[in-house]
Amino acid sequence: VVSGGVVRTCSGALLDDTRRSRTPYFLTAADCIDTQAEATSVEVNLLYQSTVCNGSTPRSTAKISGAVLLSVGNSVRHSLVRLSGQPDAKIGYLGW
């Protein structure tokens, strides 16, 4: 995420809905994404992993750039976005 010219790294999760539609909803902290401009700058790296424990810099085998901001919660600090791309079918989603 780019915010004010600064690149930030955050974690999050893909969430599926009750219809199991595989709409690419992504949940992260509100401190990470709280404007549409930040959502537009999102680059999500899926399957971000090293080949060995304590190995070199992890690599991603699936990237999605850009998102639409759907919700920012203040009491429970969250941001929910819909990613602009569809993850590969082998990518798992968390139940919602």
Image: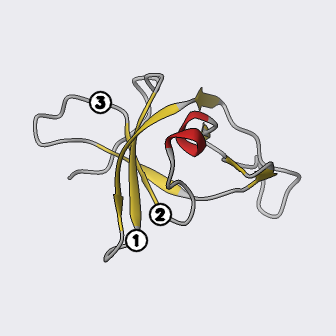
| For residue 39, above or below residue 84 | below
Q: Position of residue 58 (x, y in %)?
A: 78, 48
Who's the residue at 82% across and 64% down the image? 54
Most distant residue in the right direction: 56
Given the image, on which type of amino acid does mark 1 rest?
A: Arg
Nearest the eye: 27 or 22: 27
Q: Where is residue 48 in the image (x, y as percent from the top left)?
A: 65, 45
Whether the residues at callouts 1 and 2 have beta carbons within 8 Å, the answer is yes
Nearest the eye: 90 or 13: 13
Who's the residue at 17% across and 34% down the image? 20
Q: Where is residue 9 in the image (x, y as percent from the top left)?
A: 69, 56
Q: Splitting the image into 4 quarters, where does residue 69 fall?
A: top left
Q: Residue 30's mark?
A: 2
In this rendering, position of residue 3 left or right of residue 34: right
Given the image, on which type of amino acid does mark 3 rest?
A: Thr
Given the image, on which type of amino acid does mark 2 rest?
A: Ala
Which element type, helix, strand or loop, lies under badge 3? loop
Nearest the eye: 91 or 75: 75
Identify the residue position indicated by label 3 in the image: 23
Q: How far apart are marks 1 and 3 (CA)?
A: 22 Å
In this rendering, position of residue 3 left or right of residue 87: right
Q: Of tags 1 and 3, which is closer to the observer? A: 1
* Count of picture labels: 3
Residue 4 visible to the viewer? yes
Q: Splitting the image into 4 quarters, where does residue 62 fall?
A: top right
Q: How crowded is mark 2: few (under 14 residues within 10 Å), some or many (20 or more)?
A: some
Q: Residue 77's mark?
A: 1
Say whether disc 3 or disc 2 marks the residue closer to the N-terminus.
3
| For residue 51, above or below residue 79 | above
Q: How crowded is mark 1: few (under 14 residues within 10 Å), some or many (20 or more)?
A: few
